[in-house]
Amino acid sequence: MNAQPVRIAVVYEPGKKPKPVWFELNRRQHKVIETTYFWKDRLGDTTRLHFAVSDGEALYELIFDPSEQSWTVESHRIE
């Protein structure tokens, strides 16, 4: 699956990594039930944040690009 921009709600707390709460994909809101994994990578000079999250039905990879202040979902699969 290609990266798709998503609308997302995130909780930011001082000293902690962002916590995705829900995101919209294909006009459907997905509530994040669990974050199963978190990692960082680099794309050029930008350090991107990756979150593997589950809505209870599928696993999604949410990616935050701080240079563009944007979120995308890059892949998902049925668990």
Image: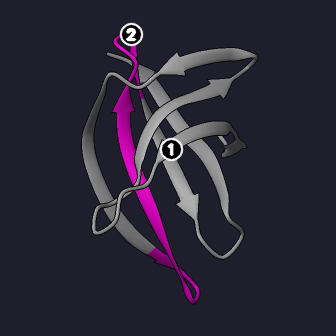
Q: Which residue is mark 2?
A: 57
Magenta highlight on residue 68: no
Q: Which residue is mark 1?
A: 10
For the stretch drawn in magenta, the main secondary structure is: strand
Is residue 2 at least partly visible in the picture? yes
Q: Position of residue 2 (x, y in %)?
A: 67, 43
Q: Position of residue 23 (x, y in %)?
A: 58, 30
- For label 2, the crowd category at 10 Å Cα-Cα, with few meaning under 14, some 14 to 19 and many 20 or more, is few
Amino acid identity at mark 2: Glu
Hey, what amino acid is under mark 1?
A: Val
Q: Identify the residue shown where x is 67% and y is 64%.
A: 69
61 and 12: which is toward the camera: 12
Count of all numbered marks drawn on residues in the image: 2
* CA gap, disc 1 and disc 2: 20 Å
Which segment is the magenta one? 42-59
State which quadrant residue 66 falls in: bottom right
Q: Please, what secondary structure does the residue beneath circle 1 have? A: strand
Q: Nearer the viewer, residue 22 or 65?
A: 22
The quadrant of the image that shows the C terminus is top left
